[in-house]
Amino acid sequence: MDGKCAIVTGAARGIGLATADLFREAGWRVAMVDRDSAELARAEASRGDALALARDVSNPQDVDAIMRETAAWAGRIDALVNNAGVAEFGPIEDCDFEMWRRVMATNLDGVFLCTQAATPYLKETAGAVVNIASISGLRASTLRVAYGTSKAAVIHLTRQQAAELGEYGIRCNAVCPGPVRTKLAMAVHTQEIIDAYHDAIPLNRYGSEREIAEVICFLCSDKASYVTGQVIAADGGFESTGVGLP
Ligand code: NAD
């Protein structure tokens, strides 16, 4: 993988940070994007040679800057990992339009904007896109009207991207993580949800950031050179069971 460059959004912590670390271990250069500049600075300081970009993926000007600055730094973009995400749970009657828009702005608009802006660069390298969706986008549940819908849309957007960009050799896939104990998840997972996941997941446990990162990096690597348009659940078997969740 020497000399290649990946952009990972939402890379200041959680799954994005684990993914940035794994890319670097494999010899890639990594642009770490996050709108939380303080957390990004902490992550970058302990890691050295990455490019840290304190930008918001839901802002079109920021997104253009991400691509320009990364290309100026590395001379190329080989992979884009659209990982930045937010979660807000609540029943449909409590999901006001501001909450709906906050979730869609990052989870869906961000994936669209980043992929669109990266496409000219990815055409040059026949690069890869990995969109981080969720098992919440595969299966409906209570409390996730905005989050689940945003992730279902990301799954379809991935297929659109794969259909359209395949002629340039650009591969686009989605990863649907099961539950991982990140800041995002632990802010919305009640004890009821934690217990339900334990029982519904055949492996009876949450996943780790690293277990998700391994799948993401595989999909960006040449080992996945004939894989595109796929939606891959890394979820301990949850999706295979059909057991419901709150
Ligand atoms: P996290 O909160 O630890 O990390 C998300 C990062 O994204 C944060 O650093 C945050 O500042 C950043 N971010 C949010 N909005 C942004 C924006 N508009 N622009 C730039 N950066 C932004 O969460 P995580 O659990 O590591 O989540 C990573 C992805 O995995 C998300 O897309 C999430 O929906 C998805 N996911 C997580 C789980 C889980 O259980 N943790 C399960 C399924 C899917």
Image (cartoon, helix red, strand yellow):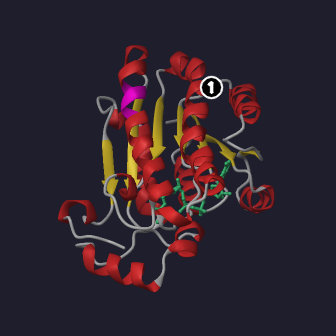
Q: What residue is pinned by disc 1?
A: 117
Residue 71 in the figure: left or right of residue 22: right
The foreground one among 243 and 73 is: 243
Tell me what residue is drawn at x 60 percent, y 58 percent.
96
x, y percentage for residue 131?
A: 47, 42
Residue 102 in the figure: left or right of residue 130: right
Tell me what residue is drawn at x 29 percent, y 29 percent.
226
Residue 95 in the figure: left or right of residue 73: left
x, y percentage for residue 9?
A: 62, 46
The foreground one among 101 and 196 is: 101
Give the class, few, some or many, for how many residues have Cα within 10 Å of label 1's Cα (few <14, many ≥20).
Answer: some
The foreground one among 193 and 42 is: 193
Let me know if residue 134 is in the magenta part.
no
The foreground one among 50 and 157 is: 157
x, y percentage for residue 202?
A: 22, 73
SS at circle 1: helix
Residue 218: in sight, yes or no?
no
Q: Give the main secondary structure, helix, strand or loop, of the magenta stretch.
A: helix
In the depicted structure, whether residue 56 falls above or below residue 44: above
x, y percentage for residue 42?
A: 77, 63
Q: Quadrant of residue 194?
A: bottom left
Residue at the front extreme of this rendering: 93
In the depicted structure, whether residue 146 falls above or below residue 123: below
Q: Where in the image, quadrant-wise, is ligand 1 located?
A: bottom right
In the depicted structure, whether residue 192 falls above or below residue 228: below
Residue 27: in sight, yes or no?
yes
User: In the image, which residues are magenta?
Assistant: 158-162
Amino acid type at circle 1 is Ala
Tell me what residue is drawn at x 25 percent, y 60 percent.
239
